[in-house]
Image (spheres, helix red, strand yellow):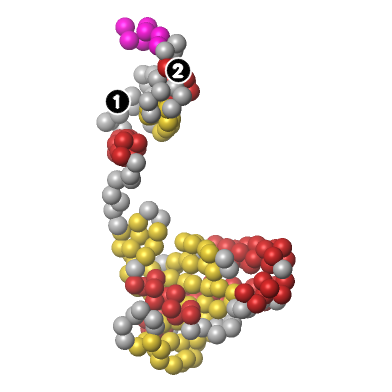
Amino acid sequence: MNSRIDIADILPSVNVPSLVIHRRDDIAVDVEAGRRLAELMPNAKYIELSGVDHIPWVGENSNQILDEMSIFLTGDWPPMETERILTTVLFTDIVESTKRVVGMGDQRWRNLLERHHDIVREELKRFRGQEIDTAGDGFFAIFDGPARAIHCACAIREAVMSLGISIRAGLHTGECEVSAGKVSGIAVHIGSRVMGHAGPGEVLVSSTVKDLVAGSGLRFIDRDVFTLKGVPGERRLYIAEQ
């Protein structure tokens, strides 16, 4: 009986915020009906999901439907579960970038930055790194292996020389929190601070990274003991060489 009732004419008068969720391969109601329903209501939000089930609490994405309803009603995402992982963090940036911007001008600098970003992303892909964030001329990436992270940093350093620039890099391995695509934790903070002590062309690593890659064939030069801002105690840092 319900399928014979046509309410299309009154839908444009529904001005309250409305949420329409429809599974693409719904076995009971064609997806075009859901799209049309949302299209006719001036303040409707339409979300199309995969799946064949018509009943919302049945199917692989029933939890996602509840999340979307919660967001729609409250304006907030439901609490996200935080995952903890052991990972190697890599930070890089261009040496004396501010000085270069002034000397090159905005347009030439943007062109250089695009080429730099392409090189970094190419090397991240080659060494199976995951880009987490980029700001200005800096990159933040993670790796599931410290040796690959060092090789990637060294490869980036060599590759960007063709652009006439030098980078510095810092690496640390530790436990991080992952939530909604964001990576955080003291290990991230340490990695960033390690990079801050790196000189032009240096790939600087914490003693944790050095110890984890023992036997890999990588060479290290003792750089000294440093106090990392915001991190208790002192840390010995090493220059990594292939």
Q: Which residue is mark 1?
A: 55
Residue 101 in the magenta stretch? The answer is no
Quadrant location of residue 67? Answer: top left
**Disc 2 and disc 1 in contact, CB within 8 angstroms:** no
Q: On the picture, is 219 further left or further right than 176?
A: right
Relative depth, front residue between 184 and 128: 184
Residue 3 in the magenta stretch? The answer is yes
- Amino acid of disc 2: Pro
Report the mark closest to the observer, 2 or 1.
Answer: 2
- Above or below: residue 86 compared with residue 30: below
- Above or below: residue 239 compared with residue 90: below
- Amino acid of disc 1: Ile
Q: Are there few (<14), some (14-19), or many (20+) residues within 10 Å of tag 1? A: few
Please name the residue shown 44% across and 93% down the image.
224
Relative depth, front residue between 48 and 111: 111
Q: Position of residue 222 (x, y in %)?
A: 46, 92
Q: Position of residue 122 (x, y in %)?
A: 59, 63
Q: Which mark is residue 153?
A: none
Q: Position of residue 176 (x, y in %)?
A: 34, 67
Please name the residue shown 42% across and 31% down the image.
45
Image quarter (top left, top right, bottom left or bottom right) of the C terminus: bottom right
Q: Which mark is residue 12?
A: 2
Q: Can residue 176 be seen here?
A: yes
Q: Can residue 212 be seen here?
A: no
Going from the N terminus, do you reach mark 2 or mark 1 first?
Answer: 2
Q: Which residues are magenta?
A: 1-7
